[in-house]
Image (cartoon, rainbow, N blue to C red):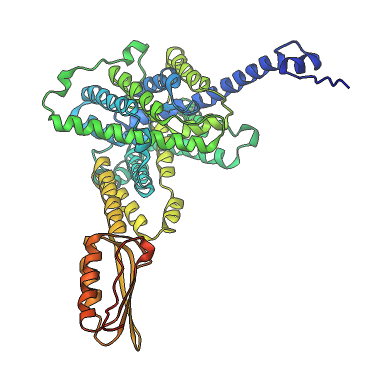
Amino acid sequence: MNTTVDIITPKHQANSAGGPPGASTGSAKAGAWMRDLSASLVVFLVALPLCMGIALASGMPPAAGLVTGIIGGLVVGFLAGQPLQVSGPAAGLAVIVFQMVREHGVGALGPILMLAGAVQLVAGLLKTGRWFRAISPEVIHGMLAGIGVLIVIQQFHVVLDRAPEHSGPANIKAMWGAIFGGLFPLNGSKEEAAALVGITTIAVMLLWERFRPAKLKLVPGALLGITAATTMAQVLGLHVNRVKVPANLTQMISFPSLDALHGLKLSTIVGTALALAFIASAETLLSAAAVDQMQTRSKTNYDRELAAQGIGNILCGLVGSLPMTGVIVRSSANVQAGAETRRSAILHGAWMLVSVVLLGSMLRLIPTASLAAVLVLVGIKLVKPAEIKKLGRFGVVPVLIYFASMITIVATDLLTGVLVGVGLSLMRLLYTVTHLEARVVEEENNTHIHLNGVGTFLAIPRIAQALDKVGPGKDVHIHCANLRYIDHACIEVIEGWTEQREQNGQLVHVEIEKLHLRYRARVSESVS
């Protein structure tokens, strides 16, 4: 009997369904294009106010943030190792950029940023991408919390149309004067008008977040808050500071000059560039890892992502804009909006470019207090009490490192805070890998010595102290089964002590065979 087997291919399936060959494939491609298009619009609406607000928080004109957003979409979007990640100016770098601009001037940012981008590019080419993620969570969360606190206390002054101070403590100290020297008593001051704009922005954002319909969940609250505040300021004719956006794109570009670095020490230039590269890379790759967990459509090539960020930051430095990272807020919006490919990130950059070219007059109506209010909420969300609770599951030390990093960042600067956190984490690691517990338990005819942890030469004093507590006349049992490691230095100490006790007629048992070591204590022939 002959059996005929029909092999059904996608082409046959399409024909059997009544459609032309390739119809289903074409339909799928069209659907992916539409999802990417709609997602890009959502990301654009989220990114537009954040780019301008982060630029203001960095001590730079809003146009610098817009240019970074454009480069992040049109250039890095093509090259990114995580296709669904969106790159642009990040709140996490606002603090270090603000300090740099305040101390060295705007002109120094471009060359230093180009150097930082080169460091990232080389690191990506050398395939070190994954190593940038080797930072303990308590340091990362402490860093983000410290940045959040700094953004809040800094943007508090901008919400009142005042200039922020140069450091965290100075901003905290100036808050009292800002409240009772500008806002109160209520007398129709400029600070009151700006505060009304900021409060309106925050109120609309919070109400939208609380009551927005499920069908409109992708509409960003920041856009609605800024729109409402801008409309109110126009209708009431409030005299508040407005966003300054140049009339054309060429005025947004400022090519760097090495003259701007005149007078700066080489150590300052290199140190600042390395700090920018390190923090930007860590934030980017942590964001990429989060995007991996949100969806299954694509996985991150960390080395390619790092190299792409390096190219992006070199270009940002070349045109005098802000540094960029992969940003989790815009990336999560991209994923939630249903983006399928890197087209969404690229298109969001195109919409940013169109807005700058065609909507400059509308952008110039936005009050700076409204953008600052958006950043205040962003800063508050960076301080996550839930993270402290999670860290608390692993003991008090991670929580202490978290607060040490956060407080140091607020009190000094970002780089110092990160170094303090990393240093404390390394000290904790050193303690963990070298710590040994020696417990002596006395019984009627026996003495038990329990050794737990790691036995290295650093543990010799502790082992010797435990052995010295053993009195004569009892059998001794040294339990080493719970040691994760023991080196020859500790073995020699135990061996020498054992031989000495055996010569005095004392019986010693050393349980060390589970460590697969050749040494095993002998039992004295005279005792046996």
Q: Quadrant of residue 256?
A: top left
Q: Residue at x 61, y 19 (%)?
A: 34
Q: Nearer the viewer, residue 293 or 226?
A: 293
Q: Position of residue 501 (x, y in %)?
A: 22, 79
Q: Nearer the viewer, residue 264 or 371?
A: 264
Q: Position of residue 76 (x, y in %)?
A: 41, 21
Q: Is residue 319 above or below residue 146?
A: above
Asked if one can make out residue 162 in the rendered structure from this viewpoint, the answer is: no
Q: Quadrant of residue 33?
A: top right
Q: Is residue 38 left or right of residue 77?
A: right
Q: Position of residue 239 (x, y in %)?
A: 38, 28
On-image quarter of the N terminus: top right
Q: Is residue 391 above or below residue 324?
A: below
For the image shown, how many numbered marks are present on the structure? Answer: 0
Q: Nearer the viewer, residue 478 or 294?
A: 478
On-image quarter of the C terminus: bottom left
Asked if one can make out residue 100 in the rendered structure from this viewpoint, the answer is: yes
Q: Position of residue 266 (x, y in %)?
A: 14, 29
Residue at the left extreme, as displayed: 263
Q: Nearer the viewer, residue 96 or 48?
A: 96
Q: Residue at x 41, y 58 (%)?
A: 394
